[in-house]
Image (tube, grey):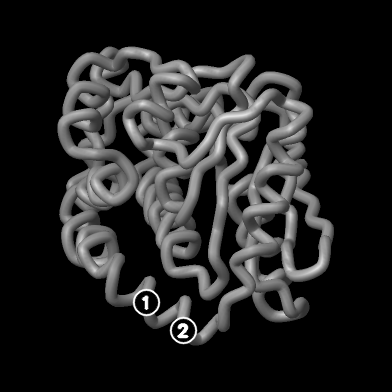
Amino acid sequence: MANVDFTLDESVAVITLNSGENRFNPDFLNTFRKVLTTVETETEARTIIVTSGHEKIFSNGLDLEWLAPIIQNQDTAAAKSFFYLLMDTFKRVATCPLITMAAISGHAFAGGAIFSCAFDYRLMRSDRGFFCFPEVDLGIPFLPGMLALLRKAIPYSVMEDMVFSGRRLTAEECLAGRIVRSIHPMEQLLPAALTFAKSLNKKRSTVAEMKKRMNKPILDAIEKEDPAYIESGAFHV
C-alpha cells in the first residue's frame, strides 16, 4: 500500500512520500491525490512542500514492474486509464491553488523528474542525487503534456540537451541550469524549504488564477493533445 503523509507547520503543509522509491502506479497516485485534496479542503495552508522519506530517492517515476506486464498483456484499457490518471495528477499539481515546492531529497529520474517540474519551485539536496530524463535510452517518448511541464521548469536549451542525451545532472548542474532555485545539504534542505515557504503566504484565489493563466499551455497539452496519443494505444515501456 502506498504511504503518503502530511504535517502542518504554520501556513505550510509538508507532504512526505513514504512509498520506497515512490514509483507511480494507481495506488500511489490516488493516495497522493487524496492527501493533496485533504490539504486543499481541510487546512488553511498557503504553501505545500513535497519531499521523500527515502534516504536517497525522491522519485524513480513510473512503476515499470506494475506497468510493463499490463502493456505486454495488451490490457490497453488499464494502460490508458493509468496514463490519464498520471497526467491528471501532474495537472493537479500545476493548478494547485497553493504555492508548491518540490524538496528533491535524492534521485529524481524520468517521471519523478517530470513530476517535480509541475511544482512552482524546486529545491534540491546538494550531497546526493541526480536529476535526469532517461526516456530516450528507454525508448519511451514524452507525451505533449510532459514536454509542456518541462518547458515551464527548464530553460529550453538545457531541456533539449537533457531530453536528447539522457544525461544525469548533479544538484550543482541543476542550479547552474536554473532547474532548481537552491541546493542544500540534506540536513538543511527541508529547513530551507520551510523558511522560503513561510515567506510566501499568498492568497489562494489569486495564486489559482495566476496558475490558470500562466500554465495554460500545460493544460491545453494535457487536455487537448495527450488524449490522441493515449487513445492510440501505442505505449512504449
Mark number, residue 210: 1
The dot on residue 65 is none
Query: Which percent across, then down, holds residue 114?
Result: 40, 39
Near-viewer residue (105 or 181): 181
- Quarter where residue 134 is shown: top left
Can I make out residue 9 in this image?
Answer: yes
Residue shown at the point (34%, 46%) measured from the top left: 153
Q: Which residue is mark 2?
A: 206
Quadrant for the C terminus in the image: top left
Q: In the rendered image of this protein, does residue 159 appear above or below residue 121?
A: above
Mark 1, secondary structure of its residue: helix
Number of dots carrying numbers: 2
Q: Secondary structure at mark 2?
A: helix
Q: In which image quadrant can residue 221 be found?
A: bottom left
Q: Are marks 1 and 2 in contact (CB under 8 Å)?
A: yes
In the image, what residue occupies the spot 52% across and 75% down? 97
Residue in front for this viewpoint, 189 or 22 = 189
Give how far across and how far down residue 217 sits, in percent: 21, 63
Is 42 placed above or below 226 here?
Answer: below
What's the amino acid at mark 1?
Met
Q: Which residue occupies 64% across, 64% down? A: 199
